[in-house]
Image (tube, rainbow, N blue to C red):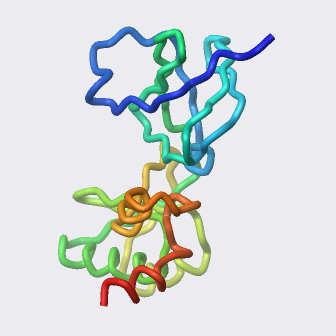
Amino acid sequence: MSLTRAVEVVPSIACAGAPIADCIELAYDERYRRRMRYVARGGTPFLLDLPRATVLQAGDALRLEDGRLIRIEATAEALVEVTASRAGELARLAWHIGNRHVPAQVEAHRILIREDAVIVDMLRGLGASIRPIRTGFMPESGAYRVVEEEHEHGDHPTGAHHHGAHRARDS
């Protein structure tokens, strides 16, 4: 018996108000896929079968061959909330996080990162307030990821491994 295939990612804006057949909850590392067998929360089995590896964003949906939609949700993960007393300080902390190529979810009044003792110690030393939390992780994919998607040769959601090549081309 063959599985129903999920053949398209439907952006959240395009599936707003559409009937959702089931949901699948995935952690950040599980949301970068091309081909994988899944069973959604409500019991719907399916095969993700996309033309290339794609970052599955929370809120988007997968369209099955029969037209049903499976909504993608972000699993709550152990993260660190980074805050600062002033916006300018938070921007400075964001620069230090980005300079170390740490995946980060940047929001107006906080930055979320994965627990990393070295990074957390560095941020505390820079004056950051740190608090462990559990929530879905949706880090920025970055400008290099956009370039990779356009050229179809990236193989990780952060695109960190290609930075040197893209810098050389952009210079």
Instruction: List x then y, in percent, for residue 16.
Output: 28, 20
Q: Quadrant of the C terminus?
A: bottom left
Question: In the image, what residue occupies the spot 60% across and 44% down?
Answer: 33
Question: In the image, what residue occupies the spot 60% across and 71% down?
Answer: 116
Residue extending farthest to the right is 1
Instruction: List x then y, in percent, for residue 1.
Output: 81, 10
Q: Quadrant of residue 75?
A: top right
Question: In the image, what residue occupies the spot 28% across and 81% down?
Answer: 92
Tell which of 139 and 146 is nearer to you: 146
The vertical placement of 148 against 167, above or below, is above
Instruction: List x then y, in percent, for residue 19.
Output: 38, 8
Left or right: where 54 falls relative to 48: left
**Does any portion of residue 140 appear in the rendered image?**
no
The vertical placement of 86 against 51, above or below, is below
Question: In the image, what residue occupies the spot 49% across and 47% down?
Answer: 55
Q: Quadrant of residue 95?
A: bottom left
The vertical placement of 144 against 50, above or below, is below
**Tally of marks:** 0
**Does any portion of residue 102 appear in the rendered image?**
yes
Tell which of 27 and 49 is nearer to you: 49
Instruction: List x then y, in percent, for residue 61.
Output: 44, 27
Q: Quadrant of residue 40?
A: top right
